[in-house]
Image (cartoon, rainbow, N blue to C red):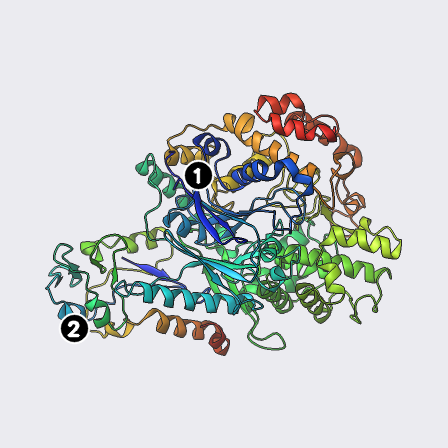
């Protein structure tokens, strides 16, 4: 067994109620590490033969909660949630913050594999090796805040009764879904602590399809033994010192972005990306900080950064709304993207998304898309159940968010996410509306535009990334640089936090892996072999897709049409992405990644990496 | 020795020995496994003598002592023999919330409260009347 792993995974079949322990060969863990990489591997081994036929929301799909060898050691805890994605039909390694992964490893497991589908709502309760499938009928239909309250109380009471001499139990870690997940909304999240979410991928819908409301875990054992604990202590100190010095994330989290990315870099979605610039000083971070932040620093276990702030509206119409910062993505997608530039209104919409268990990015994207169709007269008031979906009309957007979470009226259509909605509206209205859909391969584009050239994504970052529009998995060249997706694959497989690993010496993460596992891993080995292998596997799973949509890289490895329109305003007015530049970059990227001219991994690339079965499966696409 | 509870998201707090002046935990121990450090005034646990009966938990107004998760003895903050590591890391992190002070004749005991009590108070302070919905 490799050091740094608990060595066991829980496999739970919700159809039969069976619970068993499974393990993977050392070779699998050495190659795919954990989290995102291991998810791609497990899903391929189990579903690969009939990948295109697997309905992501059907009982045959598999829901994964995976840690990595660095979980609990690398400062800041994250857990990777995955499965065949209801958004892109491929695999997304979607990570969520909190203690869940640490508790799970202390309970003796590296991950949880959930198969089948429960008949009635359930939640899982894990206390070390005691695993129970318990009824969740009393919390089905409850929002995030009520779910957390009921389960925290119930699980602590249960622990107290089961272990009467122990004393007070620290609350178990929870992952849960809100009503949106229960209703299989494709933009639903798997969430923790009200405000943390695994958003990209749509795994809240998958969890809801399995009628799994939540998982609570309490582990009392130590973390798995490691190769060199003294080295790990030194590395933790280096990571912490770097985080302590990072004023940006410590002081503001990403909450400074709502003004910065609009006014300065001109790369923020404004009115469904019709613009990417604004200079609304009333939307500055000082307004959030001085009026709304009731807690300046909030962290999860072991995190030196504390990028979370807590915002609460104390007066006026939205009094009592509570959410995190909101962070930049929420400020953008539930603010500027909807023509909203009032901090209190933004906090209100962000709270609504948290409570209902919706991804603020992708829900903000789809309602922004609907608002543009309303602006253009393609959707009218009648289509929208009487809602006047004008830019800045916060009440209208709030109604729409609720309708989506409960799949009521127009919400049932919008619950399918921007890409699927666009195709359906095209059919109904017979108008090309895909040109207004700002997404890539079923996944909404993160709130970082590429037209001004001043933000961090590059011209092909969204077009050829294996997780589509996911701004936490951007790619670019060279492949062994920090601008490529291979770095994100390492973080999501580790599993570790992007922010706490930001700006560190380039080899630190590899040294950390070696100190934990005792196995040598170099940057070169990662980019030429292991990381690249995971990239190819995810690319294959994405391209195979199905059953409702299959991505053809000749057609779909593109930016949203909007990014080829010139910016209409701001300091970078007139700038746009040039198609020739994208085509050129794409060709170079395909070559570097070992893909053919159409973007499909080449036989020789796959064989060299030992992915013969993947090569065979891709044959029909070539 | 220090556990951080978060019964209501955002309202996290450390739950550890409040340094009562009258030592109800020491009084309650049927086997005299608890003693008072001459150097720091902290409660010291003799792990060998402790029978893990849990009486000190019930005696503590904050139910602060807790059992070791794997071994059969109670865990109580011993102030790291006068060199508390929590203070060290708090300084390093730039928070400067913790510092070492001489023991005074103050009602420290008031801060020995159960996780529920502290969570309820903190949530009220943060979230106002809304907090009633959260705990």
> Which label is found at residue A411?
none
- The residue shown at (52%, 56%) is A252
Residue A272, image x, y percentages: 75, 55
In the rendered image, residue A267, in percent from the top left (x then y), is placed at 69, 49
Provide the residue designation for mark 1. A23
Dot 2 falls on a residue whose secondary structure is loop
Chain for numbered disc 1: A
> Against B51, is A551 above or below?
above
Q: CA distance from mark 1 to mark 2?
A: 52 Å
Question: Helix, strand or loop at disc 1?
Answer: loop
Q: Residue at x 13, y 57 (%)?
A: B46
Task: Please give the name of the residue rendered at 63% of the width and 53% of the height, measured from the top-left corner.
Answer: A260
Q: Position of residue A500 (x, y in %)?
A: 47, 46
- Viewer-proximal residue among A477 and A105: A105
Residue sitting nearer the eye, A117 or A362:
A117
Query: Which label is found at residue B22?
Result: 2
- Viewer can see residue A258: no
Do the residues at pointers 1 and 2 share their chain?
A: no
């Amino acid at each position: 067994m490799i050091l740094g792993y608990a060595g066991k995974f829980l496999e739970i079949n919700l159809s039969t109620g069976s619970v068993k322990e499974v393990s993977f060969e050392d070779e699998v863990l050495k190659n795919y590490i954990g989290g995102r990489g291991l998810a791609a591997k497990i899903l391929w081994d189990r579903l690969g033969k009939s990948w295109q036929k697997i309905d992501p929301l059907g009982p045959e799909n598999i829901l994964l909660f995976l840690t990595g060898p660095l979980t609990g050691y690398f400062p800041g805890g994250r857990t990777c949630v995955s499965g065949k994605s209801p958004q892109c039909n491929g695999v997304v390694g979607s990570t969520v913050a909190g203690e869940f992964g640490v508790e799970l490893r202390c309970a003796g497991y590296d991950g949880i594999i959930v198969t089948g589908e429960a008949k009635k709502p359930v939640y899982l309760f894990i206390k070390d090796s005691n695993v129970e499938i318990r009824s969740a009928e009393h919390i089905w239909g409850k929002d995030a805040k009520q779910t957390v309250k009921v389960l925290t109380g119930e699980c602590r009471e249960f622990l107290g009764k089961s272990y009467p001499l122990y004393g007070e139990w620290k609350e178990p870690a929870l992952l849960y879904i809100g009503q949106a997940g229960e209703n299989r909304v494709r933009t639903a999240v798997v969430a923790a602590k009200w405000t943390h979410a695994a958003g990209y991928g749509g795994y809240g819908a998958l969890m809801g399809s399995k009628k799994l409301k939540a998982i609570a875990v309490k582990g009392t054992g130590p973390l798995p033994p490691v190769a060199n604990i003294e080295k790990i202590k030194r590395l933790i100190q280096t990571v912490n010192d770097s985080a302590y010095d990072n004023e940006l994330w410590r002081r503001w989290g990403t909450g400074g972005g709502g003004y910065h990315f609009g006014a300065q870099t001109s790369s923020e979605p404004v009115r469904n990306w019709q613009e990417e610039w604004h200079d609304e000083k009333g939307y500055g971070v000082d307004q959030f900080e001085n009026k709304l932040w009731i807690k300046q620093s909030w962290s999860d276990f072991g995190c030196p950064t504390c990028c979370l702030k807590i915002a609460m509206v104390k007066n006026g119409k939205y009094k009592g709304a509570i959410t995190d910062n909101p962070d930049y993505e929420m400020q953008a997608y539930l603010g500027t993207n909807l023509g909203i530039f009032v901090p209190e209104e933004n906090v209100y919409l962000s709270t609504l998304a948290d409570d209902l268990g919706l991804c603020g990015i992708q829900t903000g994207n789809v309602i922004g898309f609907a608002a543009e169709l309303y602006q253009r007269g393609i959707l009218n008031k009648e289509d929208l159940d009487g809602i006047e979906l004008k830019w800045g009309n916060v009440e209208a957007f709030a109604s729409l968010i609720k309708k989506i979470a409960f799949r009521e009226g127009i919400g049932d259509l919008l619950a399918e996410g921007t890409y699927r909605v666009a195709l359906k509206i095209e059919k109904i209205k017979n108008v090309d509306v895909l040109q207004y859909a700002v997404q890539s391969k079923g996944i909404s584009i993160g709130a970082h535009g590429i037209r001004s050239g001043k933000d961090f994504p590059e011209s092909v970052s969204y077009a050829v990334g294996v997780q589509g529009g996911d701004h936490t998995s951007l790619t670019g060249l060279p492949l062994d640089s920090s601008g490529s997706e291979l770095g994100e694959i390492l973080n999501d497989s580790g599993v570790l936090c992007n922010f706490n690993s930001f700006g560190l010496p380039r080899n630190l993460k590899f040294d950390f892996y070696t100190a934990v596992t005792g196995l040598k891993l170099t940057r070169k080995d990662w980019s030429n072999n292991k990381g690249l292998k995971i990239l190819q596997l995810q690319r294959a799973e994405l391209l195979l897709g199905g059953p409702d949509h299959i991505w053809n890289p000749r057609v779909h490895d593109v930016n949203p049409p909007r990014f080829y329109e010139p910016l209409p305003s701001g300091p970078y007015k007139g700038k746009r992405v040039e198609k020739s530049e994208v085509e050129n970059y794409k060709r170079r990227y395909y070559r570097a990644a070992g893909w053919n001219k159409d973007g499909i991994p080449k036989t020789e690339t796959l064989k060299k990496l030992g992915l013969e079965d993947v090569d065979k499966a891709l044959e029909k696409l070539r | 020795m220090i556990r951080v509870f978060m019964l209501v998201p955002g309202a996290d707090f450390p739950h550890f020995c409040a340094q009562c002046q009258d030592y109800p935990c020491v009084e309650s121990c049927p086997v005299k496994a608890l003693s008072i450090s001459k150097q720091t005034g902290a409660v010291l646990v003799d792990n060998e003598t402790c029978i893990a009966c849990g009486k000190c938990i019930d005696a503590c107004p904050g139910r602060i002592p807790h059992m070791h998760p794997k071994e059969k003895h109670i865990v109580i903050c011993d102030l790291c023999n006068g060199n508390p590591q929590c203070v060290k890391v708090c300084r390093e992190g730039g928070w400067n919330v913790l510092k070492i002070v001489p023991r005074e004749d103050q009602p420290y005991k008031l801060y020995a409260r159960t996780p529920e009590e502290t969570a309820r108070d903190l949530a009220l302070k943060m979230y106002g009347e809304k907090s009633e919905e959260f705990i």
